[in-house]
């Protein structure tokens, strides 16, 4: 079963690269452009999707101007069932998004595999209303599903650029005759690959444009603390998570 899972993941990543490489590169151009203008890259996701917002925050080898929008009731540690209920509420996002400093030079990445629930859709729409460029990471497998948002739209219809994570409905890759449900979740793996690939491309673009990319060093490398403090100081006023 281990071999089957790894083979499925490999196939999924290959499919994502072949189908969405140009879209990921276009997203990278927006990320690089935002950083060039002094902007931030905000990320938002509910439930397990929030893991991806932390995946690229304050990460060795990653970009510094990254801001995860972390609203704890929509995560899992304050109550998993409650977080799912809240994600389905129209207008709930207004409670925390009104406190977010999102500007027209920023990029906002909203992550939701199903793209059905109101909170991620509202976050995307609020960010667009504030002038930011909005990228969605979602699954096209849900394109024919009914939206729970009052507009009737799915996430991919509410963003400037949608990237498909190619995850099947149910976010599970494996089956077994003695297991009555599919299993083997994939969206965190493909989502991380999309984000890390996007940011790696943006870093290369900035470098080729003569701009030193703001990239963190591992704290376990000599001289990293001074390097990282200098970079963090440039953004800590807008990224409260640095404080």
Image: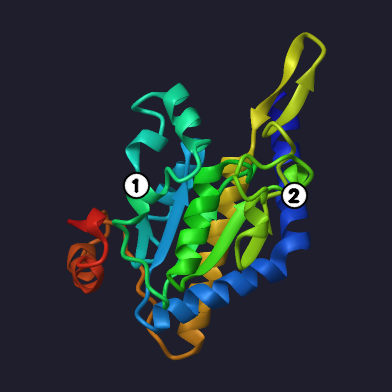
Of marks 2 and 1, which one's residue comes earlier in the chain?
Answer: 1
> Which numbered circle lies on residue 95?
1
Q: Outermost residue, bottom direction?
A: 210
Residue 203 shown left or right of residue 65 in the figure: right
Q: Residues within 10 Å of mark 1 (few under 14, many from 20)?
A: few
Relative vertical location of residue 206 with respect to residue 179 in this rendering, above or below: below
Q: Give the quadrant of the C terminus.
A: bottom left
> Which numbered circle lies on residue 177?
none
Residue contact between numbered discs 2 and 1, judged by CB atoms under 8 Å: no
> Is residue 109 visible to us here?
no
Residue at x 62%, y 43% (from the top left corner): 113
Q: Position of residue 155 (x, y in %)?
A: 62, 52
Residue 182, image quadrant: top right
Of residues 145 and 58, the one drawn nearer to the viewer in this rendering? 145
Residue 81 shown left or right of residue 38 in the figure: right
Q: Give the quadrant of the N terminus.
A: top right
> Is residue 113 visible to us here?
yes
Between marks 2 and 1, how big is the CA–CA gap?
Answer: 29 Å
Q: Residues within 10 Å of mark 2 (few under 14, many from 20)?
A: many
User: What residue would you read off at disc 2?
Assistant: 140
Front disc: 2 or 1: 1
Residue 24, image quadrant: bottom right
Q: Position of residue 8 (x, y in %)?
A: 75, 38
Q: Outermost residue, front direction?
A: 150
| Numbered disc 1: secondary structure | helix
| Numbered disc 2: secondary structure | helix
Residue at x 46%, y 22% (from the top left corner): 81
Residue 242 shown left or right of residue 190 in the figure: left
Q: Position of residue 41 (x, y in %)?
A: 42, 66
Residue at x 69%, y 31% (from the top left corner): 170
Residue at x 72%, y 60% (from the top left corner): 17
């Amino acid at each position: 079963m281990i071999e089957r899972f790894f083979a499925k993941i490999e196939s999924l990543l290959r499919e994502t690269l072949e189908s969405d490489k140009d879209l990921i590169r276009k997203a990278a151009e927006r990320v690089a452009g935002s950083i060039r203008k002094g902007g931030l890259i905000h990320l938002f996701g509910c439930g397990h999707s929030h893991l991806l917002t932390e995946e690229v925050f304050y990460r060795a080898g990653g970009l510094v101007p990254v801001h995860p929008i972390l609203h704890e009731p929509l995560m899992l540690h304050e109550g998993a069932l409650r977080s799912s209920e809240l994600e389905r509420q129209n207008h709930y996002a207004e409670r925390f998004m009104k406190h977010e400093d999102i500007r027209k030079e920023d990029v906002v990445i909203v992550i939701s595999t199903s793209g059905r629930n109101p909170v991620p859709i509202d976050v995307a729409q609020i960010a667009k209303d504030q002038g930011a460029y909005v990228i969605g990471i979602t699954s096209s497998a849900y394109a024919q599903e009914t939206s729970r948002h009052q507009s009737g739209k799915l996430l991919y219809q509410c963003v400037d650029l949608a990237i498909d994570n190619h995850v099947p409905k149910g976010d599970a890759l494996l089956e077994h005759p003695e297991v009555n449900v599919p299993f083997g979740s994939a969206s965190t793996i493909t989502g991380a690959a999309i984000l890390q690939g996007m940011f790696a491309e943006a870093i290369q673009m900035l470098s080729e444009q003569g701009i030193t990319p703001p990239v963190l060093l591992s704290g376990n490398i000599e001289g990293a603390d001074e390097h990282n403090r200098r970079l963090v100081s440039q953004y800590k006023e807008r990224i409260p998570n640095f404080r």
